[in-house]
C-alpha cells in the first residue's frame, strides 16, 4: 500500500491546481470529483437514481446529466443535498479505495472537497489543506464557472469554515498569492511525502 495524502480545501481554493503540480512530479492523483462524474455518467446506476429522484428535468439534450441545474437545486435545498451526498459518497469511497490499492508509487494524492464533512475517510494518512480567503475563492470560481457570486457564497456556507479546516490540517498550502507561489510549496511537501515510508 502507498501512503495516502488527502488534499482538501473550500470551493475554488485551488485543489485541482495544486493536484496538477503534484502530478508534474509524477505523483498519482485520485480525484473524488472525477469519480463522481464517472458515477453519474448516463450508463451508471447513480444517473438513474438522480434523474428519477428529482422532479425537475435533469437530462440535457445530449442525454447527459445537467450538472449546472443539479448544483443550483442542491445548494438551494439542504435536504436534497443530503440525499445526493448519502447516495453518492459510499460509492465514491469504494472507488477511491479500489484505485488506491492499485498504486505502486510511495504515495498518492486523493482530492476530496468534503474530506472533513463526510466521514470517515479512514484510508487517509495525512491531510493537506489548500487555503485561500473567501473573496479570492468567490472571485476565482465566478471567473472559472461564469456563475453568480451568490451561488458560490451558498456553496461556501454549506462547507466547513476556514478556521475549522485549518485546525484539522497536517500540512497547509497557502494559495492567497499568485499561482507561481504554489510551485515551491508543492516541491517542499513532495520531498517530505516521498520519504514518509510505507504505512
Ligand atoms: N493563486 C491563484 N491566483 C489566481 N487564480 C487562481 C489561483 N489559484 C487557482 N486559480 C484559479 O482559480 C480557479 C479555482 O482553482 P481550482 O479549480 O484549482 O480550485 P478547486 O479548489 O479545485 O475548486 P473546486 O472546489 O471548484 O474544485 C481556477 O480557474 C484556477 O485556475
Ligand atoms: Mg477542483
Image: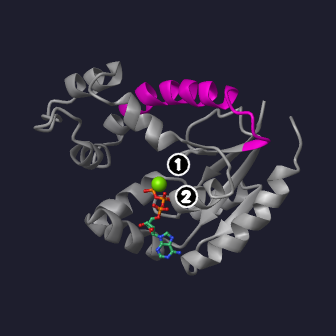
Q: Quadrant of residue 143?
A: bottom left
Q: Secondary structure at mark 1?
A: loop
- Is 13 rendered above or below residue 88? below
The quarter of the image holding the N terminus is: top right
User: Any atom of ligand 1 within 8 Å of the CB at mark 1?
Assistant: yes
The quarter of the image holding the C terminus is: top right
Would you say residue 96 sits in the magenta stretch?
Answer: yes
Residue labelled with disc 2: 15
Q: Are marks 1 and 2 in contact (CB under 8 Å)?
A: yes
What label does residue 113 carry, if any? 1
Dot 2, how many residues are within 10 Å of its Cα: few (below 14), some (14-19), or many (20+)?
many
Label 1 vs label 2: CA separation?
Answer: 8 Å
Dot 1, how many residues are within 10 Å of its Cα: few (below 14), some (14-19), or many (20+)?
many
Would you say residue 180 sits in the magenta stretch?
Answer: no
Q: Residue at x 56, y 24 (%)?
A: 94
Q: Nearer the viewer, mark 1 or mark 2?
A: 2
Q: Earlier in the sequence, mark 1 or mark 2?
A: 2
Q: Secondary structure at mark 2?
A: helix
Do we see residue 152 in this rendering? Answer: yes
Residue 190 screen position, x and y as percent: 76, 58
Amino acid at each position: 500500500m502507498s501512503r495516502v495524502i488527502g488534499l482538501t480545501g473550500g470551493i475554488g481554493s485551488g485543489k485541482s491546481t495544486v493536484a496538477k503540480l503534484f502530478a508534474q512530479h509524477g505523483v498519482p492523483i485520485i480525484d473524488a470529483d472525477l469519480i463522481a462524474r464517472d458515477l453519474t455518467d448516463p450508463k451508471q446506476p447513480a444517473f438513474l437514481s438522480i434523474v428519477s429522484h428529482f422532479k425537475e428535468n435533469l437530462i440535457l439534450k445530449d442525454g447527459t446529466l445537467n450538472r449546472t441545474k443539479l448544483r443550483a437545486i442542491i445548494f438551494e435545498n439542504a435536504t436534497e443535498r443530503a440525499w445526493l451526498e448519502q447516495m453518492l459518497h459510499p460509492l465514491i469511497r469504494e472507488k477511491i479505495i479500489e484505485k488506491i490499492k492499485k498504486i505502486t508509487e510511495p504515495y498518492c494524492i486523493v482530492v476530496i472537497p468534503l474530506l472533513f464533512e463526510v466521514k470517515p475517510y479512514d484510508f487517509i494518512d495525512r491531510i493537506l489543506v489548500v487555503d485561500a480567503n473567501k473573496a479570492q475563492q468567490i472571485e476565482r470560481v465566478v471567473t472559472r464557472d461564469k456563475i453568480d457570486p451568490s451561488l458560490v457564497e451558498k456553496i461556501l456556507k454549506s462547507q466547513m469554515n476556514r478556521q475549522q479546516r485549518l485546525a484539522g490540517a497536517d500540512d497547509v498550502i497557502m494559495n492567497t498569492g499568485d499561482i507561481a507561489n504554489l510551485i515551491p510549496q508543492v516541491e517542499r511537501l513532495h520531498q517530505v511525502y516521498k520519504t514518509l515510508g510505507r504505512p
